[in-house]
Image (cartoon, helix red, strand yellow):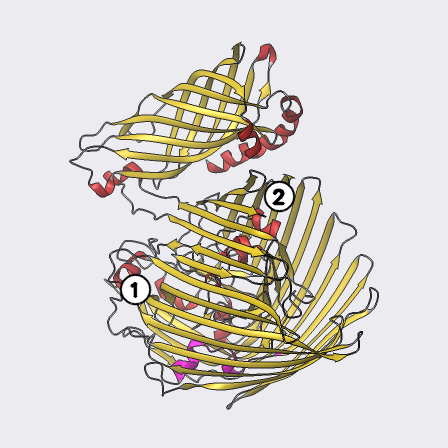
Amino acid sequence: MCKCLIAALLLLLPASTQAQGAEASADDRLHLGLSGAVPMGEAYGGRWAAQPGVAVRAATWFHGGRIHVAFHLFENETLVEGLPGFLALRGELGWGVPLALPAGLRLTPSGQVGVLTMLFEGDEVVSEALTNETELTMGVAGRLEVPLGGAWRVFAAAEWVHVYTAVPIDLAFIQAGLSVSVSTPGWLRGML
Amino acid sequence: MLVLTFLLGLLLGFGPSDPEPPPCPGGQALNRAEIEAAGVVYLSDLYRLFDGLRTTTVDGFTWQATHASGVPFEGEAFTIVVDGAPASLSLFDEQDLEGLGVPIHEIASITFCPVSGFVAGQWAAGGTLYIETISSEPGLAARGALQIGNETGDPGPYRYTELVTPNVDKFGVDGEGAVGYRARAFAGRVGLRAYRFFPTDRAQIVRTREATSRLFVRQQHLAVRFDGAAEVLGGTHALTATGHVASDFRFTEAAARELPVRRVDGQGGLRGSWPLGGSRRSPLQLQYRLGLETQTLDADDSALPSFFPDWRSTTRSASLEAQRGPPTRRLAVGATLKQTTVNGPGLPDDAGATLLTLYAQHRHAPRAGEVAQQTEIGAVVSDRHARLKLAQRLGWRSGVQQLALALVLDGQIPEEAYRYGYWAARGYTGLQIDSLPYRALRPPQPSREVSVRLTWAIQPGSRWRATTSLEGRWLRGLYVERPAFVLRPGAEAPSGFVIAVADAGGETVGAQVALEGTHGIWRGRAFYSLLTEVGGTEAFQEVWARVPHYRTGVAITLRPDGDFSLRGALTAESSTRWPGYGALDGAVALNQYVYTDGTPPRWLLDVTADKAFWDRRARLSLVFRNLLNTEERYHPLGAALDLRLYARLTVNVRAQ
């Protein structure tokens, strides 16, 4: 699974050189997004069920593509008596190549790395020393943006995330939301 | 592992002569940009960047390196020199680079030269690893780094189910920093470095947890280093002082387990040079070195019965060298006196020896098209043994080609690099545990070694370069430990015995091919390295079976500008077998971990993204080790290193 992910990321590199010329001059902006995320399929072998959540995202141009930072918060309800539920907070750093499509549409395939922090609930099961777990994640996503007018766009995205726990977890989400592009602050442009 | 390093460097603009590594046929050099792009987070990560080195580790933090010389993974594989000063890191067959105390962001270059020779007044058997640090910048400057790492494999939510697995400890938060100041006639640098490490892998945890009385199984290190230089009385003089304190779980093969120890090392050195006249074209100067080293090793919160290393060692050295001529045409003669005294359980009071080294060097480096040569001859004498040393290097450069030949008559007397067996033979019992007898059939004897190395390099332009090396070694009189370990039911660690032989010998061959090139923003390097024995005694073949015979790899670096790099390195190494661990194959530890008698072939993909921000005041590195999450093990009793992610942030602040 991870090898396919790595191959996908490598394929993005040459595409970035094509996208760079078209996008760089027009995309010196900061793209902020807010979305709802709905889980797809089963991820925990029938023990928990991921719930719809909310995600926020910020992206800007970076070396032939877009780099983004995102946070995604979602609950996980227990399906088995005696197991604690947990709140999951996923943070990710990703990079993708925006591809211009007709009618102003934009498709951005991307890869990301991040961490998944799991905050457990349930006093009867969880002791003070076992309140959280954090593990590395990697994933790929595809994002389709449709212009609304001005700086606003509506988008839909599908993403798959692999969590490197000892018993691996594979999460899939569909996201839909709004994004707005603003001028990149001077301090951020200077930082990058 | 907590490592605190204070670094004070003074006057790097004018120090004693020969601060840079000499010409090195068959060597490999790395500059600062390459080190940064490779995502070095520990000093021992530098080993994996050298084609011809092989490495082993039990815990994933302390690494041993080897190449064609000597006994693999035992003792000093090479001499380490930092800014012209030798660093003494060896203790009981372990040479831990992490004890060096040099912050990673201070390293300007590192060169591995695999040919033996006289360096800094002593014979560098097996070659030399030269580390050069960056010069202090004018004005006030500060650099610091924070890093954190995570190894995958935590249980996650499954910790509450029947699929529960042990937690995997993270690395860090670690940090390091340096503050420097340089004016016209003065320069200073102070550095700080901190690391933590937890030897809690499934392969180790039963052994480490039972060995300590602490609640948490963790390692801590503290290293202090001062460097200073000044022009006094018409000469240039430099002072180096290093201190290292470690609370460690030191894997010791003689005990077949980790031993909880507290190690305190101190090293001080004063070196300098005086011009004595001579002509302008053939100056005459005198160089001197004075050194003092101390080592102590004690049990640290040990739960092991009857474990009292109580090791105390002091080494004093003095060296004089007279040099005539410029660096390109120089004759040097010198002598070094080194006295070591040791105290420990079972040893007579003030055990040790005195070593005298006499040598002469002649270097002639003419213009391109002519043959350059470097000849070194000397002798090392103790009160019990003596050994002649000879190293002859020839080099020829014409146009785009270089050819180099090195012939070395080598071999060490036991007093040159004290092995554990040397002290065990004299009665030292400090590292022995009851369940594992150590028996040396004979104490270490003087060894003999003859090596030949031929290197050819071609570089038609600035875009690509190819290098090929062939090497053969003939070794006799080696001291080799032959373990025979078993795991008894209910035991926390292997038992058995170790028998050491002093007359192992054989022949090794090595070959390396490397091709590197650049094209625009891309840079690539591919290499192949062969290192194997081709015959010898049974003990010799057994110990060389531990070394991966084949190592190959390709690294591609994308550097669109000076602020960002993306590097991927795919490396493959062949499997190994450790004959003394044969009875452990399939043995099940108390935590159900299953041991093997060797290591599998390794296919490792490391990826590093390195980005400078804020006008290069800050740098963020994301380092993925073993991105394919293949089985990465280096020792039959060692940890399996799963996919790891390190995040390292370096900040550079300057004020004029």
Q: In terms of image quadrants, where is residue B484?
A: bottom left
Residue to which mark 1 is pinned? B493
| Residue lying at the far bottom of the rendered structure | B383
Q: Position of residue B143 (x, y in %)?
A: 52, 50
From the viewer's perspective, tell me whether residue A31 is left or right of residue B300: right
Q: Which residues are magenta?
A: B410-425
Looking at the rendered structure, the kind of residue marked 1 is Ala
Residue at screen point 60% across, 12% down: A102
Q: Is residue B161 visible?
A: no
Q: Residue at x 50, y 13 (%)?
A: A152
Label drawn at residue B354: none
Visible in this render: residue A154?
Answer: yes
Q: In this orientation, which residue lies closer to the viewer: B377 or B58?
A: B377
Residue B31 occupies which quadrant of the picture? Answer: bottom right
Q: Is residue A170 magenta?
A: no
Q: Is residue B283 above or below residue B176?
A: below
Q: Which residue is mark 2?
A: B557
Give x and y (percent) for residue B325. 76, 76
- Residue in the image at 50% along x and 23% along y: A142
Please give the chain letter of the residue carrying mark 1: B
Residue B417 is inside the magenta segment: yes
For badge 2, the amino acid type reads Thr
